[in-house]
Image (tube, rainbow, N blue to C red):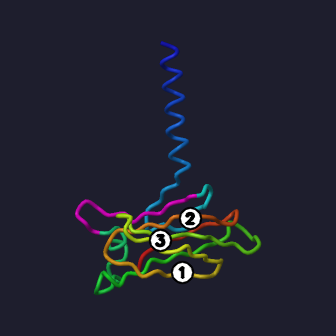
Amino acid sequence: MKKIIITSIILFTAVIFFNKLSAQNPIPAFNVPVIVDPTVFEEAVLPTGVYLNQIDNLSRQPENIEERKLKVNVQPDDDKEIIWVIFSVYSLDQQTIYGPFTVYEGEIHETTIDERQWGVKVLNSSPGCRLSVWID
């Protein structure tokens, strides 16, 4: 019995640790620490097909959903040297991949996306940075 309990605890801990390493975040997400590469952001869609960012920004949605802009911004955790993030933008159906792109502190990178669901994958980054990803 002790062996089963110990094995269960080890397995449970491994699953939690693996989920922390994958670092998947929804879009929109603001000031998310980039701890482990790859950090992933994916567009959240409700079961009705309504994008989460449409609820947050109903008054700011473009008339044509094909004209959406995915935006990425990086900020430092504290006063550090120049910070940067290298990332790629991809459709969740894996049909389209843009990048890699590099964004530095103070810049907002924009990528035009269509009506499909999209994600952002951090490929590399300077230590001690936070990333914001949203769609206008």
Q: Nearer the viewer, residue 126 or 61?
A: 126
Gap between marks 3 and 2 measured at Cα: 9 Å
Left or right: residue 35 versus residue 111 is: right
Q: Which mark is residue 89?
A: 3
Considering every residue shown, the one lying at the far front of the view is 95
Counting from the top left corner in percent of width and height, residue 64 is at: 28, 85
Q: How far is disc 1 from disc 2 in space, using C-alphas?
A: 14 Å
Residue that badge 1 annotates: 109
Labels 3 & 2 near each other (Cβ < 8 A): no
Q: Taking 127 as reference, is 135 above or below it?
A: below
Q: Amino acid at mark 3?
A: Val
- Confirm whether the magenta stretch covers residue 42: yes
Instruction: Give amino acid for label 1.
Output: His
Quarter-of-image position of residue 130 = bottom right
Residue at coordinates 61% horizontally, 55% vertically from top-left? 36
Q: Residue at x 54, y 80 (%)?
A: 109
- In the image, which residues are magenta? 38-50
**Can residue 28 be found in the magenta stretch?**
no
Look at label 2 and name its amino acid. Val
Tag 1 secondary structure: strand
Residue linked to disc 2: 122
Q: Main secondary structure of the magenta part?
A: loop
Task: Tell me what residue is drawn at x 60 percent, y 70 percent.
Answer: 86
Q: Nearer the viewer, residue 11 or 75?
A: 11
Query: The C terminus is located in which quarter?
Result: bottom left
Depth check, front residue: 127 or 37: 37
Q: Secondary structure at mark 2?
A: strand
